Amino acid sequence: MTRSYHLSPVPNLRVLGDHHKLFRTRGTHNNQIYYRLFSGNVTESTIYALSTSPGKAGVAVLRISGSRAKDAIRKMASIGEKQSDLKPRQAYFRRIRDPRTGEVLDRALVLWFPGPRSFTGEDTVELQIHGGNAVVKSVLDALGSLDGFRMAEQGEFARRAFDNDKLDLTELEGLADLLNAETEIQRKVALRQAEGGLRIPYDSWREDIIRCMATTEAVIDFGEDEQIEEGVLDQVIQDIKKLRNSISRHLDDSRVGEIVRSGINVAIVGPPNAGKSTLLNRLAKREAAIVSDIPGTTRDIVEVTLNLGGYPVIVSDTAGLRESEDLVEIEGIKRAKARQVYICLLSFAHLKTDKKDIHIDDVIRDVIDSTTYVLLNKQDAAPHLNPFDFAKKVQHETGACKVWSVSCKTGEGVDVFLNDIVSILKMRYDDSIASPALITQARHRHHLEECVQGLDAYLAMPAQDIVLSAEELRQAANALGRITGRVDVEDVLDVLFGQFCIGK
């Protein structure tokens, strides 16, 4: 199975080849016949692949999917000759033999998942064999010898699940994110999406647009003949306004889902020799950045990825803030300002103090505002100062959001700083992440914005241009359909038939 296309009209239908079939579906509209195009070979190959990571392991799982999947266990595990011999979703412990020679290759657990109740929607088999390289290779070679079997291409099992309507595009993207998740927050967000967290609201919105479009189409084509009630389009306008506001609120999320998916960018800025590289190395627990007393040692951005409270955080060590004509340093400072969170690192030596005031260079003041977090480093080199009081004074002087006093050399105060940063991240993102429908892909946002544009165009269209209005709704519905991968003109026909009994 695949998607549906609108081919209208088709005066001269030519043969598409052995890999395609064309079927006429019910209904006509404006004398245009709708067809459904099914691509793919009717006798598609049965595919197989190693589903666990390659290399030595206690257990390796081989997955087989396709119309001939049962042949694998019938010929290699001697089960399935009779339908009663093989029960779905039940594990069988069997010897696995080479179908060519009868040689025993391994002992394994065999599981049978008949379609459509399987991941791909096709007949599926899983072989849980021992994870030695030689064992895996021998079983894969044996599967390859079976007629109609071939090694799966990258992502082909998921592609077949999509083609068979087991997963939509958002669920596939969520599954991919789940496999790549490195933190607890990324896992939660990806799992919700893989389980249909985005599909449900998007499909609901699309159905609402299709219903409004069906009503509009009915007024265009059958308004006079069927004596459709007056004012029905006024209700459509009200429904579209509500729908447009719902989607706009969904878009107004500060891109939290995309940020969490890719990582929260935190830039460490500050003057040269303040200890930025030392802080980065301490956070990374390795020598990620070169530490030197020479100003300008860090010229480009050095990044490390951390897991802070379950949040993926990308911490960047940037070039020192100073007056410079060096283009590389200037570019590094420019990139630092593009990050989402600023941490300005100063050392006590950089702060010229007298009894009442603190003097900070103008180049440093320029990057500190009410959204900046300030970290005062090298408190071990200023034992005569009270760190807490001094931090309060710096916060008052600079207007910074929050100020900490630490020693990156000894580690004193660093744990308190990290715990506070975790609390800040939770305060900033936890409520948004709790939403079951969180935009995680730029692709989703783009199509949602296209949808809103189509709805706005519909609402701005003069009443006499009802035909063009219907086209704007169609474009809006298609924009939502492209998110999930479901774009089908037959949906409109089904609604029309059901509501207005056209063609009776």
Image: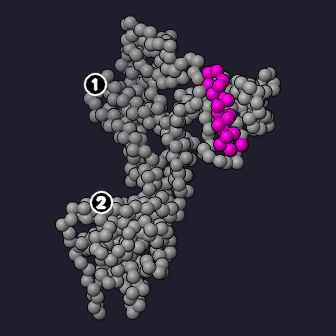
Residue 362, compared with residue 231, is above or below; it is below
Residue drawn at 39 percent across, 93 percent down: 384
Residue drawn at 53 percent across, 56 percent down: 183
* Sequence-wise first label, 2 or 1: 2
What is the spatial separation of the Cα atoms under label 2 and label 1, in whole angstroms? Answer: 49 Å
Residue drawn at 42 percent across, 72 percent down: 279
Is residue 356 left or right of 205 when viewed as pictured?
left
Give x and y (percent) for residue 93: 79, 37
Of badges 2 and 1, nearer the viewer stands: 2
Task: Classify the position of the N terminus by image quarter.
Answer: top right
The residue where tag 2 is placed is 335
| Residue type of the residue flagged with mark 1 | Asp
Give x and y (percent) for residue 399: 31, 75
Residue at the limit of the structure toward the left, as seen here: 325
Q: What colouring method underlies this structural image?
A: one colour
Q: Secondary structure at mark 2?
A: helix
The residue where tag 1 is placed is 465
Nearer to us in this view, 139 or 476: 139
| Residue type of the residue flagged with mark 2 | Arg
Point out the stretch of residues depicted in magenta: 130-149
Give x and y (percent) for residue 218: 41, 20
Is residue 467 left or right of 405 when viewed as pictured?
left
Q: Secondary structure at mark 1?
A: loop
Tell me if label 2 and label 1 are in contact, CB under 8 Å.
no
